Amino acid sequence: MGNYRFICSHCGKSFESPASEVKECPFCFWSSSVKREDELAVEKKRLSRTAGGKTGIGSYNPLYFAFKVLLALALVGSVGYFGYLGYRQWDQNQKKTGSFFSVQGEKGETSKAERLVPDTVAPELSSQERDLLLREVSLPERAVASEAEKIILAREVKFKTGWSDQLPSPAWSLAQYEQMIAEQERFYKITLPRSYKKKLTGLFENKYLAGVGAFAKGDLLATRDLFIESLLFPPYSTNVQKHRGVALTMLKPFITDTLSKIGALNQMVADQNRRQQGKEIEAEYGSLFALIQEGRWEEAILKLDQLQLVATQMQSLTQERPAMPPYPSVVGMIDQDIQRSLAALSTPGVSSTTDLLHVREDLAQKKDVLVDLSDEAYNKAIAIYQEGMTFVREGKYKDAFRVLSTIRGPETLRNQAQTKLAILAKVVSLPESSETRSRDV
């Protein structure tokens, strides 16, 4: 069977098609403007006969002529108005779908999509859908993070730690120590000998205040040992019970507070190495953002892998009890009741290392984004995208759907693939897909 010849009244171009009826021009995509050439010839003859009959009357009617002019102007105005609305809709769609990628081809060139015959490319789709399906985009040489990906990469998680660099209570001053002794004397109605009180203040200055100075310098172990030595009180009496009943009872506020400080210092000493590791990983975590901001994706991935390894190792150490440095030898000369308290404090709790759970989750999310942005993954994604577009141009829509659905990132390229997949899903899901018909043609 021969092809029918059609003429578009909108753009004036003619074309041939085996179908007896075509609803859309393949050149301007204008609907309801296509007519068969033989039907148009018959219509022209009929109009010419009608015009000839009218001219044979030999009369001229000015009102009829004005009516025809107004009708022509109204028709032109309607066409222009609806054309403007169509252009507005098309321009908005262009802005939505082309915000990141730019359409290939310079002005004056005919793109690959325009060179295809629309009737052979998924006839079930609208002209706008076919345009989106066939549109090819120019891709940047290197991957660029989307706005959503930038939010993930820029997010900074605060390190949570149970460590404390402070003593549980303020350190005593000499004036407070002497005031405490005076208040205890009034309370118990006992006056300590002046010589004994002088020995107590001498011990406080030489040991306790020296420990306060060591703590200010960051020497935790020296601070602990000096605080222990400050509890080696001179004997109040050769009778142990009297010594405990008078001297140690009156000094109990100082003893209790100092023991609490020694327990805290034991925990600080035990955590000292891990606390240093925590500070180092926190500094490395901060350096990761400099690489991300500069777009050095591969280097950022290497840094991130190192951080994940260290974070995993540190988290596994949280259940281990660190080794404790022994007490100074003078501890054996301290009162036995105080010694028992010191022995209970010599085994600190499980190390309160940095809680890296949220940090590790953040690193995992950043790695997912960075892997997609890496040159290797990006080039692979581009190759997959181009392969899918080749299948689209060849009318192999099922293959195109299968290939494009494997694109996972980066997000900007994935969004382009998802737009085409949404259109391809309509064609692939049809009982008799246009893929089969386009091959038959």
Image (spheres, grey):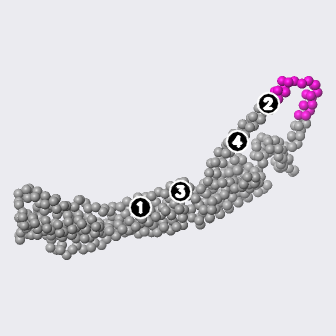
The answer to which quarter of the image holds residue 327 is bottom left
Q: CA distance from mark 1 to mark 3?
A: 21 Å
Residue 395 x, y percent position in the rendering: 73, 57
Q: Residue at x 88, y 34 (%)?
A: 47
The residue labelled by disc 4 is 86
Q: Which mark is residue 357?
A: 1
Which one is in front in this view, the residue at disc 1 or the one at disc 3? 3
The residue labelled by disc 2 is 71
Of callouts 2 and 3, the N-terminal one = 2
Dots 2, 3 in contact, CB < 8 A:
no
Q: CA distance from mark 2 to mark 3?
A: 57 Å
Of callouts 1 and 2, the N-terminal one = 2
Give the left or right position of residue 95, taking residue 62 as reference.
left
Of callouts 4 and 3, the N-terminal one = 4
Type of the residue with mark 3: Glu
Q: Which mark is residue 149?
A: 3
Type of the residue with mark 1: Leu
Which corner quadrant holds the C terminus? bottom right
Dots 4, 2 in contact, CB < 8 A:
no
Dots 1, 3 in contact, CB < 8 A:
no
